[in-house]
C-alpha cells in the first residue's frame, strides 16, 4: 500500500469519528492536505519526531476527543521515549499510527534502521504498549484505526506528487485550535 492511500484511510476514519488528526512533517502532511484537508487536521511543518508527543498531549488535555497521529518511522526513531510515555499514560482516545516505509521520505528516502530490521512494534511492546501491532494491508489498517495504542503500518517507499500546503502556519494553527476547542460532534 502506498503511504498516501494509508493517509486517506486514516483521514476518512478521523472525519467519521470527528477525531483530531496530527500528521508528521513534510510529504505526509502535504499528502493529507491533498486528500482530505479539514480544520481538525494538525499539519506538522517542522519539529521532526514530535507528532506523537503533540498528539499525546492533545489526547490527555482533551479526553473527550479522539486523537489519531500519523507519524513516520524516521520520526518515531528520533523520539523513542514517546513510546514509554504513551504506554504509561495509555489514553483510550489516542492512536499512534506509524507509517513505516523504511526511509526518511521527505529528505531523499535515505534508509532508516527499520530497513535494517529494527522492529517498531517490538520496541513499542518493550516500552509497555501491550496492544502494539503491525499491519500490512488496508483491511488490517482500517481495523487498527478503530483502536487505541500503537499500530505500525508497512507502506511502500515513495512520495505522492502533491502540492505544497497553501495556508500559512498561522492560518493552520488558528483553525486547528478552534476545532480542538469544540466539543466532539457526537457529544
Image (spheres, rainbow, N blue to C red):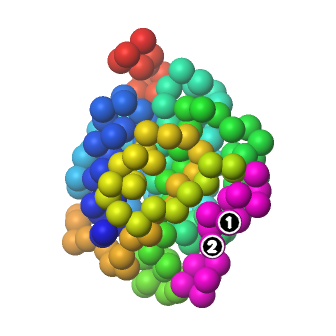
**Vertical side of 86 occupied by 40: above or below:** above
Residue under pointer 1: 122
Residue 105 counted in the magenta span: no
Q: Is residue 55 left or right of residue 126?
A: left
Horizontal and vertical percent position of residue 151: 53, 55
Residue 26 visible (yes or no) = no
The quadrant the C terminus occupies is: top left
Which residue is at the front of the view, 134 or 173?
134
Residue in the picture at 71% in, 58% down:
125
What is the C-alpha distance between the residues marked 2 and 1? 5 Å
Horizontal and vertical percent position of residue 53: 64, 48
The reply to whether the C-beta atoms of the residues labelled 2 and 1 are less than 8 Å apart is yes
Residue under pointer 2: 119
**Vertical side of 134 occupied by 85: above or below:** above
Quarter holding residue 154: bottom left
Horizontal and vertical percent position of residue 137: 35, 63
Which residue is at the front of the view, 96 or 44?
96
Mark 2 packing: few (<14 Cα in 10 Å), some, or many (20+)? some
Amino acid at each position: 500500500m502506498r503511504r498516501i492511500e494509508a493517509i486517506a484511510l486514516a483521514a476518512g476514519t478521523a472525519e467519521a469519528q470527528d477525531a483530531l488528526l496530527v500528521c508528521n512533517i513534510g510529504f505526509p502532511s502535504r499528502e493529507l492536505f491533498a486528500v482530505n484537508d479539514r480544520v481538525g487536521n494538525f499539519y506538522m511543518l517542522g519539529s521532526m519526531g514530535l507528532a506523537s508527543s503533540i498528539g499525546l498531549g492533545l489526547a490527555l488535555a482533551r479526553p473527550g476527543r479522539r486523537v489519531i497521529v500519523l507519524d513516520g518511522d524516521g520520526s518515531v526513531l528520533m523520539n523513542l521515549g514517546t513510546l514509554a510515555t504513551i504506554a504509561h499514560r495509555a489514553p483510550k482516545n489516542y492512536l499512534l499510527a506509524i507509517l513505516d516505509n523504511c526511509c526518511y521520505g521527505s529528505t531523499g528516502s535515505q534508509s532508516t534502521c527499520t530497513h535494517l530490521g529494527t522492529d517498531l512494534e517490538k520496541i513499542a511492546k518493550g516500552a509497555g504498549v501491550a496492544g502494539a501491532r503491525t499491519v500490512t494491508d488496508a483491511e488490517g489498517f482500517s481495523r487498527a484505526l478503530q483502536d487505541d495504542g500503537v499500530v505500525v503500518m508497512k507502506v511502500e517507499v515513495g512520495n505522492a506528487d502533491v502540492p505544497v500546503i497553501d495556508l500559512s502556519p498561522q492560518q493552520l494553527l488558528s483553525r486547528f485550535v478552534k476545532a480542538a476547542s469544540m466539543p466532539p460532534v457526537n457529544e
